[in-house]
Image (cartoon, helix red, strand yellow):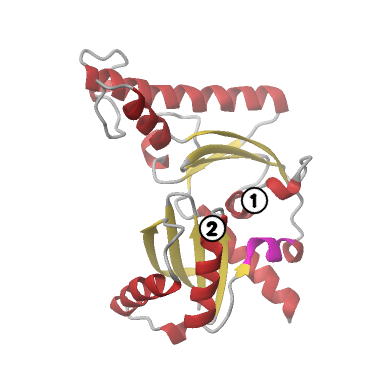
């Protein structure tokens, strides 16, 4: 089976795939100083509970956007699965993935994986919204090429900054305001409105501007933990794909393996 690792700024997700079928998925908070042995103790116990063993893993692919975590993850894979992980960068050439921006090397591995998975699942031009530590909007041309994007502060980052900077404001959760009201009538409801409707307005406004700039009919796909919440409220999002990055890693690894044989 293939172990796909999506190492992001907030969480590291490990998923086992047999072909295209996901057999198990586990998540741990990102900690750059976490050792290979810590990963091993945590993941192997969860794999055992799911009925899997270390010997079931025959290959590993990784998307990592935290450079300081790479060494431990490489050591973890090499020591416990007897092989280093294959990176997105290694897979891109095999997949023949085009990046049409001025600095292709600056596109994050997770955004490449998202673009690959979205193009395989949907036709035409695409906008991918990833609600992560940063909120990103990425453009994919009808032929599957990555053609630019937008990076904005993630909703959790914005909320934490507001809490830290304003002494009298409480820490709140992300949720839709009750009764769909926009105006809040106490501090907490005013904050909920500002965060929720503010991000809805940002997403709708950016998608509108992208469509005007590109002059295309674009399909909008959302991923990330908060994607379902925003999808329920705004009709600008057409589809939600919770495992978009992982699906892209599987596709990239398949192309890499074909090139190796």
Up the image or down, 156 lies above or below 44; here it is above
- Tell me, for residue 194, which label it has, or none: none
Which residue is depicted at the point 50% across and 81% down?
A: 79
Q: Position of residue 80 (x, y in %)?
A: 47, 81
- Whether the magenta-drawn stretch holds residue 88 is answered as yes
Q: Quadrant of residue 63?
A: bottom right
- Tell me, for residue 119, which label it has, or none: 1
**Left or right of residue 54, residue 176 in this image:** left
Residue that numbered label 2 is attached to: 68
Q: Position of residue 260 (x, y in %)?
A: 73, 78
**Left or right of residue 214, residue 194 in this image:** left
Q: Quadrant of residue 47?
A: bottom left
Up the image or down, 242 lies above or below 124; here it is below
Which residue is depicted at the point 42% across and 57% down?
A: 31
SS of the residue at dot 2?
Answer: helix
Predominant SS along the magenta part:
helix
Task: Name the residue nearer the viewer: 114 or 179.
Answer: 114
Which residue is depicted at the point 37% across and 64% down?
A: 26
- Residue 29 appears anywhere in the view: yes
Q: Which residues are magenta?
A: 87-92
Query: What is the CA distance from the residue labelled 2 to the residue labelled 1?
Result: 30 Å
Task: Name the residue nearer the viewer: 188 or 139.
Answer: 188
């Amino acid at each position: 089976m293939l172990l796909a690792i999506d190492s992001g700024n907030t969480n590291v997700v490990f998923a086992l795939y047999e072909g295209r079928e996901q057999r198990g998925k586990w998540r741990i908070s990102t900690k750059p100083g976490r050792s290979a042995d810590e990963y091993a103790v945590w993941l192997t116990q969860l794999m055992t509970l799911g009925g899997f063993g270390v010997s079931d893993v025959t290959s590993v692919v990784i998307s990592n956007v935290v450079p300081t975590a790479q060494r431990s993850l490489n050591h973890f894979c090499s020591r416990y699965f007897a092989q280093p992980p294959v990176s997105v960068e290694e897979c891109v050439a095999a997949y023949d993935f085009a990046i049409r921006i001025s600095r292709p090397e600056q596109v994050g591995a997770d955004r490449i994986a998202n673009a690959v998975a979205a193009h395989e699942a949907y036709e035409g031009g695409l906008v991918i919204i990833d609600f992560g530590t940063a909120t990103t909007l990425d453009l994919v041309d009808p032929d599957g090429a990555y053609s630019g994007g937008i990076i904005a502060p993630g909703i959790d980052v914005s909320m934490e900054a507001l809490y830290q900077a304003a002494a009298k404001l409480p820490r709140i959760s992300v949720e839709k305001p009750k009764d769909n009201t926009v105006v809040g009538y106490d501090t907490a409801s005013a904050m909920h409105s500002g965060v929720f409707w503010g991000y809805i307005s940002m997403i709708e406004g950016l998608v509108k501007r992208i469509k005007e700039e590109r002059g295309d009919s674009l399909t909008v796909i959302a991923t990330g933990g908060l994607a379902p919440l925003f999808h329920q409220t705004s009709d600008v999002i057409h589809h939600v794909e919770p495992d978009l990055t992982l699906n892209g890693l599987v596709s990239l690894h398949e192309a890499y393996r074909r090139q190796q044989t």
